Image (spheres, coloured by chain):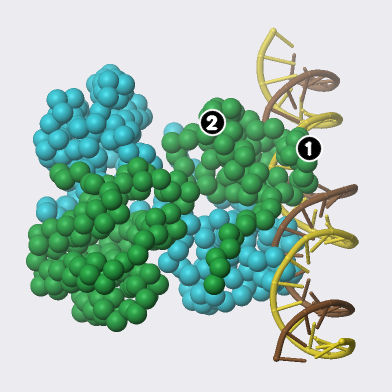
Chain colours: A cyan, B green, C yellow, D brown
Amino acid sequence: MSSFQQLSRTEHLPKRIAEEIGRGIAGGRFASGDKLPTEHILAQTFGVSRSVVREAIAQLRNEGMVETRQGVGAFVTDPQRRATIRVEQASLADPVSLRNFFQLRLPLEVEAARLAARHRTPAEIAALDAALDGMVQARDWLDEGVKADLAFHRALAAATQNEFYAIFLGYIAEKTSTSINTSFPREMGAEIVKVTIGEHAAIHGAVVAGDAPRAGEAMRQHLINSAARLGITLETS
Amino acid sequence: MSSFQQLSRTEHLPKRIAEEIGRGIAGGRFASGDKLPTEHILAQTFGVSRSVVREAIAQLRNEGMVETRQGVGAFVTDPQRRATIRVEQASLADPVSLRNFFQLRLPLEVEAARLAARHRTPAEIAALDAALDGMVQARDWLDEGVKADLAFHRALAAATQNEFYAIFLGYIAEKTSTSINTSFPREMGAEIVKVTIGEHAAIHGAVVAGDAPRAGEAMRQHLINSAARLGITLETS
DNA sequence: CGATACACGGTTATCAGACAACCCTACAAG
DNA sequence: CTTGTAGGGTTGTCTGATAACCGTGTATCG
């Protein structure tokens, strides 16, 4: 099975234009508060129709980079008040960034484990059971195993009874997983799989037992080890 | 100076329609993988033109809720792989949600303080100095003071030398601040302002001194106290 | 019978032009 | 000096048309 390069075609004009303008903003060609050229001029500049420019600007508006006022124009927003958080997959491709991402994830997951140990309900314990079982049963770790792993962390976040942990950790875990699979693919020997499952089982046990400190410690160890398996060393605090 | 209610007009058709469709997805009327009605039908349904529907769908695509394939249709994405994190301001309006949000912020800020103490550079120390000074000098706390407060936390996040802390904490701190000012406005007596500044000074001192544990503890206390001033009790872990 | 090629309808992507809603400014009127 | 009004410019929305693309069915050929 030869893996071909997936060529991006001439895909999605608005997206490319949005990125182009976005670069202009990030690169400082447009300062905060500046007025963008009119849609008409932008359309002319890029050689596309106004619809495309409008969609591009709409995207930037969604991301909170510009604000539009009818009859006036589009203005660059204060870069510090983005409406959304977005982490480009590409920005997690190098080891240093991945390490930084792990460093962000660590305290959140640890606290989530503690909170889950205190607030988990039978429904979430069942979800954790199912996820752990899915890891054990997985025939192909890189597919089923990874999915079960994600499900485990998601169930844990849900068990905190705190919607924001579910949102943020769900996103972060997903990004991490995807990044590892695409940028740092690796073989998982049977032994390593076993160890990984064991670490999850430790977290699971502590959470079910309602032992918050132990759950937090188990999670910390899991993440540190998990990073180590990728050749990443996390600071221990 | 009588303060009028700011009425929201009938603003932005595409946004409202995007929210409408988004509710349909979140509410389960469209399952993951389902195909949305065609743009033509949607336009007819909502009584608007196709342009508006297109912009609405473009917004949903940006948020990662749907994927479109030319010549085929728009499909609901797996809700677990949203491309962005977005916290609606309105969802922070009630005390319980705000408490949960604080609970998410706490471990991140604490770890950020520790990391900042280890990795801060002269430039960031200067930024922290400036922010602290801005709090002291502020004549109107609700305006200048809050801004300096935000700047302080942003500078601290920057001092971690970890881009993701800057992104996430910048967003979270901003949301928190806005939410407090809009949903839980309160008077800040001179005494309380003084205490608040003192807490920041403690963090500042520990970070400058390079004392990671002390910085973390100071931050933890600051957040717990800060929440307490809003009548919110955080779990101590 | 099986497989390839092709035509067709449906859908999204893009274009083009027009009008509506709105804002800002300047100027006139009181 | 304040208020009313007209004008031009910009974004918001509408309408209709064309291009690009996909899936499916059908016909053709081996």
Task: Tell me: residue B186, above or below residue B107.
Answer: below
Which residue is under mark 2?
B27
Tag 1, which chain?
B
| Amino acid type shown at disc 2 | Gly
Rendered residue at 24%/47% (across/down): B233
Would residue A19 appear left or right of B170 to someone viewing this image? Answer: right
- Is B177 on the left-hand or right-hand side of C12? left
Of residues B46 and A62, which is closer to you in this image?
A: B46
Q: Is residue A199 visible?
A: no
For the point 34% across and 80% down, which residue is it?
A: B139
- Residue A202 percent location from the top left of the image: 14, 29
Question: Mark 1 belongs to which amino acid?
Answer: Gln
Looking at the image, is B126 positioned above or below residue B177? below
| SS category of the residue bearing label 2 | loop
**Would residue B207 appear left or right of A63 to someone viewing this image?**
left
Q: Nearer the viewer, residue B102 or D9?
A: B102
Q: Would you name the residue on which mark 1 appears?
A: B44
In space, the residues marked 1 and 2 are separated at their CA atoms by 22 Å
Answer with mark 1 or mark 2, whichever residue precedes in sequence: 2
Q: Is residue A233 above or below residue A45?
A: above
The quarter of the picture where residue A132 lies is top left
Give the percent coordinates (x, y) of residue B226: 25, 58
Q: In the shown orientation, is residue A2 left or right of residue B9?
A: left
Q: Residues within 10 Å of mark 1 (few under 14, many from 20)?
A: few
Q: Quadrant of residue A20?
A: bottom right
**Residue B226, visible in the rendered structure:** yes
Q: Residue at x 62, y 44 (%)?
A: B18
Where is residue C27 drawn, in percent x and y? Answer: 84, 90
